Image (spheres, rainbow, N blue to C red):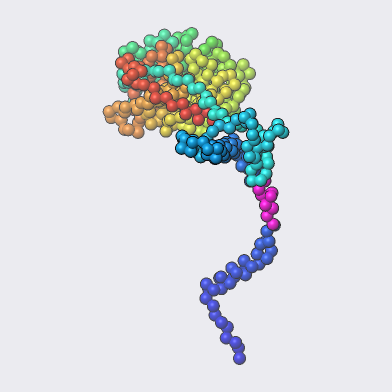
Amino acid sequence: MLEEVQRHSVHTLLFRSLKRTHDMFLSSQGLLPPVDESADKIKKAVKARDSYSLVLDKVQQNKVTKIRVIENKQDTSNDGGPGNEDTSQSESAVVPYNPGSGGTPAGVSGGTGVNTSNIGGVVIPVHQTSSIIPRKAPAMPKPKWHAPWKLYRVISGHLGWVRCVTVEPGNEWFATGSADRVIKVWELATGKLKVSLTGHISSVRGLAVSSRHPYLFSCGEDRQVKCWDLEYNKVIRHYHGHLSAVYSLTLHPTIDVLVTAGRDATARVWDMRTKANVHTLTGHTNTIASVISQAAEPQIITGSHDCTIRLWDLAAGKSIATLTNHKKSIRAVIFHPTLYMFASASPDNIKQWKCPEGSFIQNLSGHSAIVNCLAVNPEGVLVSGADNGTLHCWDWRTGYNFQRLQAPVQPGSMDSESGVFSMTFDQSGSRLITTEADKTIKIYKEDESASEETHPIHWRPEILKRRKY
């Protein structure tokens, strides 16, 4: 007869399998090496000394001091001294230990010239740390007080997003370029329209006025770079070469050179008069959103959507440095008018740099949106404008954010049309002109009624933490 096979539940079979596996691995892997207690003690002592040497020394000294206090009390009571004297020094009182006062604390050897500490039965040499010296906090200068800015004029007239602005050197008028393909020239004092220039067939993205010629330069998404003669309000030159939209342009302050940059990831250097393409600055791998120039080295700086800033040698037409600190695309770069420094704006941070190498100075954090533009005046007021219509005012030297403004959306516009696309100070630095997505131009000036009492500086030097990166 066949023996009946005993049937077990899945639960029992599973546990039997686990037991067999456990026994098999225990037999081959379960034999651990014996623990060397002395080696383990040394290891723990070294770790403790490495991490807590200063504190351990103080603990050791306090123990010795406590023993001495107790012994002194016992001696006084045994010698028949007054038993009910002032015992304000309790057992936990900390009396500073002076190594030169004679006697050696337990665990600290004397006479060898080397301090040693006995931790866990192991004697380890330590440095002279009779007291923990507090690290002196670095001195942080208090920010200069700046008057808050307030909106005092709104100019409307464009039929599309106003993308760029420039002020002429005489400070009498300024020009704006818009997505409606028109460049408009306005009186700075009154805000009245002087003239409208038509000729671009797509959005106008960049403007610059020459300080030595009656010329206005413009660029746009139609790949065109134009030179306008302001005496006749006509285009007198075109600069052909860009393969895609041109987003930014700048004029060299001392030589007749124009620099343009855009979506083809190149910056092109043009001879203003002959229209010759002197250099094509290649190296960026994505759109160049902003280009600026100065007379000193580096003469050209570009900020790109590839998250890098490049410093260029204009004479050689080559990149001399690439700054990779930003983690997100860079929409704006700007020189300080009097200091040998520049700033860059990105959604992660606004960063300040020192020329000529591009040494990192500090981060300015606070925006929660894409920062499109920057402007700085000679008094050290840096203003940044973001996609959500916020304006942040900073003290350049310390990075203190002394004011935050929300640009009001004009009647008839949606709340989403509150982006600030470009901004600039006038030549005096006393008026700030912004161009926005609600198709208006806004002019701000300092609040003359404000004082340090009405708008105090709330300065917290822990902002130093941002210097870590």
Residue 367 within the magenta-colored segment of the rendering: no
Q: Which residue is at a point 58% across and 19% down the rendered structure image?
A: 356
- Please provide the residue range marked out in magenta: 34-42
Question: How far across and down, in percent of the image, does residue 110 sit?
Answer: 68, 34
Q: Nearer the viewer, residue 225 or 311?
A: 311
Residue 72 visible to the viewer: yes
Residue at far left of view: 411
Quadrant placement of the C terminus: top right
Residue 40 within the magenta-colored segment of the rendering: yes
Residue 197 visible to the viewer: no
The dominant secondary structure in magenta is helix
Residue at far front of view: 80
Q: Which residue is at a point 42% across and 12% down the rendered structure image?
A: 427
Question: How far across and down, in percent of the image, does residue 425 sit?
Answer: 41, 17
User: In the figure, 456 relative to 328: above or below?
Assistant: above
Q: Nearer the viewer, residue 78 or 70?
A: 78
Q: Nearer the viewer, residue 204 or 450?
A: 450
Position of residue 87 in the picture relative to residue 19 (left or right): left
Q: Nearer the viewer, residue 277 or 304?
A: 304
Quadrant placement of the N terminus: bottom right
Q: Which residue is at a point 71% across and 33% down the rendered structure image?
A: 111
Q: Quadrant of residue 382?
A: top left
Residue at far right of view: 112
Question: How far across and down, in percent of the image, does residue 212 sit?
Answer: 48, 8
